[in-house]
Image: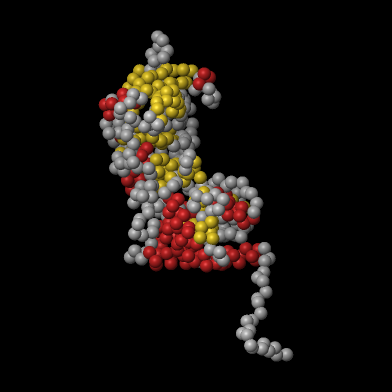
């Protein structure tokens, strides 16, 4: 583990001894390649002193005195930036009479790209590396540097004892992958995890963010190749394949690459979906005041990730006036929050459930809990999927063909209606027609869902009011 300290400037004052943070711990290795990055303000005209302390971590204690000191190195930020390719190699010291090894530091000016991407991968038929089992695969992602070297930027989790792993989805800043250069090479290495840290290399492949952003397709299935095996064996083809399952861009709404792009001349897909559905259902509400909530964003001022926040920024009163009020709140929120994945709309479902019954529910943390949250409540859930991603989990929630279940228990009712927005885009660009088709399909099940709830609770309609009699007319009853 590396502890990173230095001097920083705040309001023209220099503060010494500031602890920037600590890297992650990498087990059982003498040649660690740390993933965590540190973002610093660089001032050419100032001397910015830095110190790096290395420790061998022996326990989970945060107290550094509980761990073995391995060495330290002093430099300035200018030394790193001014080195060839902004890469500084310097020996570690701090322990008299002992060679402590070398630390390698690299720096790169950050681009203006503030997009984030949520991705998920799986692999198929990877090489078997364990004698008594299969393999314990994990992937390592590297960003290419301007000098042709590579810098590690992400590691997946380890999936134990399988040659066909499905890794969990992860969210990463696009500039960590390519610093905003969508065509920059991204290298991915696949390893078999070993407890002693001597992980076995399975193979590698390269791609770019521009390719990944295309989403799941035939172009994002990659052969995992071991160069040494390829040179030795004439019949060698590959060591398996890796497939991109998901790539969602949560970009800056001011840039056209974002699904939330605020085009001054036309609505984005989110706004069209809101308007298409909202303009119809608002006619069934007397005061036209609707609570509008968002999920999947970092909120100001501290960057806290939230999956349940009011679009209008008012926690006490999240209500918006009609569909136009909702759209206004949506556009304003895009200017204040930073979009962040992965998708987790269960807290919003819980919010509605609490409102319905006026009781407190525990927070739902995964999509499958949504299956049983609202099925017993007088509520319906409409989900419109935007973008080119695969929405398999959403399709499962929409129990049109098979009633969804959670932990072996069938949901009481089908309350979810899901459609991918791309299926309703008119080829001629007629957005009015697209919105009309969308609204018709997603709202079609609402009346039956309402009636099924009333019947299941034995709630009957109120008696019909007496026939209307115009003033001055006598209502005659025949006996």
Question: Depth check: 371 or 113 in front?
Answer: 113
> Residue at the spot x=37%, y=52% of the render?
261
- In the picture as drawn, the residue positioned furthest to the right comes out as 479
- In the picture as drawn, the residue positioned furthest to the front comes out as 12
- In the picture as drawn, the residue positioned furthest to the top comes out as 97
Which corner quadrant holds the C terminus?
Answer: bottom right
Q: Is residue 356 visible?
A: yes
Q: Is residue 390 visible?
A: no
> Residue at the spot x=34%, y=51% of the render?
256
362 sits to left or right of 40 = right
Picture layout, residue 201 above or below residue 273:
above
Task: Point out residue 344 in the picture as x, y percentages from the top left corner.
Answer: 51, 48
Total number of numbered discs in the rendering: 0
369 sits to left or right of 141 = right
Question: Depth check: 51 or 138 in front?
Answer: 51
Task: Point out residue 121 in the picture as x, y percentages from the top left corner.
Answer: 42, 43
Question: Depth check: 134 or 349 in front?
Answer: 349
Question: Depth check: 426 or 243 in front?
Answer: 426
Which corner quadrant holds the N terminus?
Answer: top left
> Residue at the spot x=33%, y=65% of the render?
428
Task: Point out residue 199 in the picture as x, y percentages from the top left corner.
Answer: 42, 29
């Amino acid at each position: 583990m590396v502890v990173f300290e230095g001097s920083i400037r705040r309001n023209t004052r220099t503060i010494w001894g500031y602890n920037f943070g600590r890297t992650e711990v990498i087990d059982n290795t003498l040649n660690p390649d740390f993933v965590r990055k540190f973002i610093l303000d660089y001032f050419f005209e100032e001397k910015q002193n830095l110190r790096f302390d290395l420790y061998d971590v022996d326990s989970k204690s945060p107290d550094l005195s509980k761990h073995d000191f391995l060495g330290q190195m002093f430099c300035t930020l200018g030394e790193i930036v001014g080195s060839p390719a902004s890469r500084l190699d310097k020996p570690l010291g701090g322990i008299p009479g002992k060679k402590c090894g070398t630390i390698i530091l690299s720096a790169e000016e950050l681009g203006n790209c503030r997009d984030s991407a949520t991705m998920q991968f799986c692999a198929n038929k990877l090489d078997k590396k364990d004698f008594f089992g299969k393999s314990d695969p994990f992937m390592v992602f590297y960003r290419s540097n301007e000098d042709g070297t590579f810098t590690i930027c992400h590691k997946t989790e380890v999936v134990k004892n399988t040659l066909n792993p499905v890794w969990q989805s992860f969210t990463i800043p696009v500039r960590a992958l390519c610093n905003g250069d969508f065509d920059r090479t991204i290298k991915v290495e696949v390893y078999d995890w070993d407890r002693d840290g001597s992980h076995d290399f399975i193979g590698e492949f390269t791609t770019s963010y521009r390719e990944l952003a295309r989403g799941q397709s035939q172009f994002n299935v990659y052969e995992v190749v071991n160069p040494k095996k390829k040179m030795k064996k004439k019949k060698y083809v590959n060591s398996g394949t890796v497939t991109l399952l998901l790539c969602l861009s949560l970009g800056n709404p001011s840039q056209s690459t974002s699904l939330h792009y605020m085009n001054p001349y036309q609505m984005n897909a989110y706004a069209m979906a809101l308007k298409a559905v909202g303009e119809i259902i608002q006619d069934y509400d007397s005061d036209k005041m609707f609570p509008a909530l968002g999920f999947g964003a970092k909120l100001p001022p501290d960057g806290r990730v939230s999956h349940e926040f009011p679009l209008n920024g008012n926690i006490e009163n999240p209500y918006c006036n009609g569909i136009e009020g909702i759209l206004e709140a949506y556009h304003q929120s895009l200017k204040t929050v930073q979009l962040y994945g992965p998708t987790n709309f269960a807290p919003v479902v819980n919010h509605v459930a609490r409102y319905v019954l006026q009781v407190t529910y525990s927070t739902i943390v995964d999509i499958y809990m949504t299956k049983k949250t609202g099925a017993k409540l007088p509520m319906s859930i409409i989900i419109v999927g935007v973008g080119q991603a695969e929405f398999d989990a959403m399709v499962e929630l929409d129990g049109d063909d098979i009633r969804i279940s959670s932990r072996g228990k069938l949901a009481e009712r089908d309350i979810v209606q899901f459609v991918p927005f791309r299926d309703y885009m008119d080829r001629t660009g007629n957005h009015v027609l697209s919105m009309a088709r969308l609204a018709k399909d997603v709202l079609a099940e609402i009346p039956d869902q309402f009636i099924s709830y009333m019947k299941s609770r034995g709630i009957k309609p109120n008696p019909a009011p007496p026939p209307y009699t115009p003033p001055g007319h006598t209502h005659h009853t025949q006996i």
